[in-house]
Amino acid sequence: MSMKIGIVCYPTFGGSGVLATELGLALSDKGYEVHFITYEQPVRLTQTFHPNIYFHEVKVPTYPLFDFPPYETALASAMVNIIVNQKLDILHLHYAIPHASAAYFARQILKKTGQDIPFITTLHGTDITLVGKDPTYAPVVAFSINESDAITAVSDSLREETLRSFNIVKDIQVIHNFVDVKRFHQTDKLHFKQMLAPDGERILVHVSNFRTVKRVPDVIRIFEKVKQVIPAKLLMIGDGPDRQNAEDLARSLGIYNDVRFLGKQEQISEILSIADLFLLPSQTESFGLSALEAMACSVPLISSNAGGLPEINIEGKTGFQSEVGDIESMAKNAIYILSDDERLHQFKKEAITQARKFEKQHIIPMYEKLYCEVVEAYKEKKAIASGE
Ligand code: GMT
């Protein structure tokens, strides 16, 4: 069934925006018409021309009265216009806040003319575990999730946490994050490795948006302990509020020369190709898309056991998990993996085997099936309501 799908997401380097963009790209490859609706071109929607992909920029005009320009109102209005003009069949919202409530608003407006369409909300993580639970947002979040025609969560753990935190009256389907192994796989970047680790040092990597939940200072402390035993370099990819802290900490620990802060990067798979270990000691992590992409590039994982991380990191095979904040244990496990070539090789093999379970061709059909079911059910509901 050919369909026109509106995807609403954050355009930034955050996992939800990345996943939403990858989903849109995969759907367009399968012949769907995909309309991205957000305030900026999503970072993974590169300059390449995709005939089935449209990008609609949500403009939020400022006005001297507004200390906080009302993005949600602008977004709901954009949704109304795009649904009507582009004749969309369904909206898929990534990250509940404020996308789900804006979609509810747009649908209420369109009901007046019978042009309303269904919407699916995909919960990604902090929209539930951190921000969504905050009493400032919680009533609106719970209401708009319940008003969604279908709800998905990116891990079993996030599903459980959503049900614990909110009174959700509908089923939540788990559709895990996925990876495109054609793009994310180890490539030969020996020259690059030699440049960054000229004496054959092990290379550790961290990728995130450097928010507090990522516990970026733990990454630096783990590395410091590893470096005391094994010659190593650390690549820090991304940017965000905790970058300066992390840089200061690396300086104060005297390891700054062995840590490279590379900032935001688009060609992450090239960097992952030279990595020996990925560090993700997060406070909360509903899935860990960055870790999955690393595993697809044959990089084992040292992580915390927060949220959905145990759903991807198999203890003793693809890496190890420790309690949040247990730097000693994470460093010990990292040293164990890195100190033996044969062992490291085995962990790398297991990492890629595990990543293949989350390949996009296994996961995309789940979304396609859900779209069809939701669109059909909504049509029936409308027909019954109008007495057809
Ligand atoms: O917190 C982030 O790093 C960004 C956040 C987002 O929603 O933009 O990422 C979340 O969504 C990703 C894609 O579903 C998940 O893989 C991440 O685990 C999740 N982050 C957290 O739960 C902290």
Image (cartoon, rainbow, N blue to C red):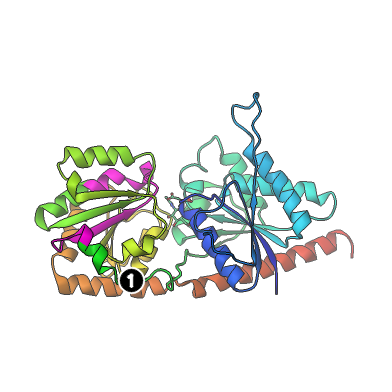
Residue 112 is situated, as x and y percent measured from the top left of the image, at 84, 49
Q: Is residue 77 left or right of residue 382?
A: left
Q: Residue at x 30, y 45 (%)?
A: 216
Q: Is residue 259 left or right of residue 95?
A: left
Residue placed most toward the observer, 327 or 293: 293
Q: Is residue 261 above or below residue 204?
A: above
Residue 369 is situated, as x and y percent measured from the top left of the image, at 62, 72
Residue at which label 1 appears:
186
Q: Is residue 277 left or right of residue 288?
A: left
Q: Residue at x 89, y 65 (%)?
A: 388
**Which quadrant: the N terminus?**
bottom right
Magenta residues, start to end: 195-220
Residue 199: say if magenta: yes
Q: Secondary structure at mark 1?
A: loop
Residue 8 is situated, as x and y percent measured from the top left of the image, at 61, 53
Residue placed most toward the observer, 66 or 145: 66
Residue 33 is situated, as x and y percent measured from the top left of the image, at 67, 66
Residue located farthest toward the left when viewing the structure as drawn:
229
Q: Crowdedness of circle 1 by 10 Å Cα count: few (<14), some, many (20+)?
A: many
